Amino acid sequence: MPFSRNPQVRLTGRLDQVSFSLTAYSQRDFTSPGPDGNSNKYLRNSCLPGLNLQVRIAAGESITGWAGIDYKRLRPELKTSMNFETRSAIGSISAFTNIRIKTTPVNMSLMGAYGQNASDLMMIGGYAVSEIISIVNDFKTYTPLSSGQFLVRFNYKRIESVCRIICRLHQKILGAKDEIAGAVYGRGPILVI
């Protein structure tokens, strides 16, 4: 996914003009929010690394397109506030697509991204408590907070040392999948929904 750097194991391959990568990753510099603040422990507690698949297709020298999908599972708590072990977790999916057109003197890039619980990818989002299943045990379920982005970038180069870049980003807060019934963990103005 865009805007994130993580320790990872990556498998890459190429078949003619098509290349792909499958990545299993953990978190280090960019971590997920949760009941104890930002930490990589929520991903570690889930016992499943984040998974990312990307495909890139080159159409000649001037056009390249690529797309990717990302899945991660977080386990925000090992024990509830009432000291009961909980297995409650939240899974989320993010996806993006990008096309880049290189010509002389203009280069153009178009990118669209959809993110559930993508705050560790430097996007607006996160997750929230959607239901408190048992008041006695404090067992909870979670819902992802989603957002979408669209980016257009033009790069105009008249002479070798002068370059003009025009960039436009549009972000849309898509909200929660389910009704929010408790604490919200995330990044950005999505928290005020």
Image: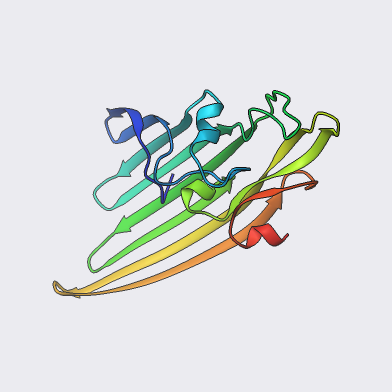
Dividing the picture into quadrants, the one containing residue 78 is: top right
Q: Residue at x 57, y 38 (%)?
A: 93
Residue that protrudes farthest toward the left in the picture? 160
Image quadrant containing the C terminus: bottom right
* Residue 137 rendering spot, x and y as whole percentages: 81, 28
Q: In the depicted view, which residue is nearer to us: 166 or 190?
A: 190
Q: Residue at x 54, y 57 (%)?
A: 149
Image quadrant containing the N terminus: top left
Which coloring applies here? Answer: rainbow
Total numbered circles: 0
* Residue 188 rendering spot, x and y as whole percentages: 59, 60
* Residue 148 rendering spot, x and y as whole percentages: 58, 54
Could you tell whether 102 is left or right of 137 in the image?
left
Where 180 falls versus 135 (above or below)? below
Q: In the depicted view, which residue is nearer to us: 162 or 138?
A: 138
Q: Residue at x 48, y 53 (%)?
A: 122
Dividing the picture into quadrants, the one containing residue 177 is: top right
Q: In the depicted view, which residue is nearer to us: 191 or 154?
A: 191
Q: In the depicted view, which residue is nearer to us: 72 or 14?
A: 72
Where 166 falls versus 83 (above or below)? below
Could you tell whether 127 is left or right of 94 in the image?
right
* Residue 65 rendering spot, x and y as whole percentages: 38, 46
Could you tell whether 147 is left or right of 106 in the image?
right
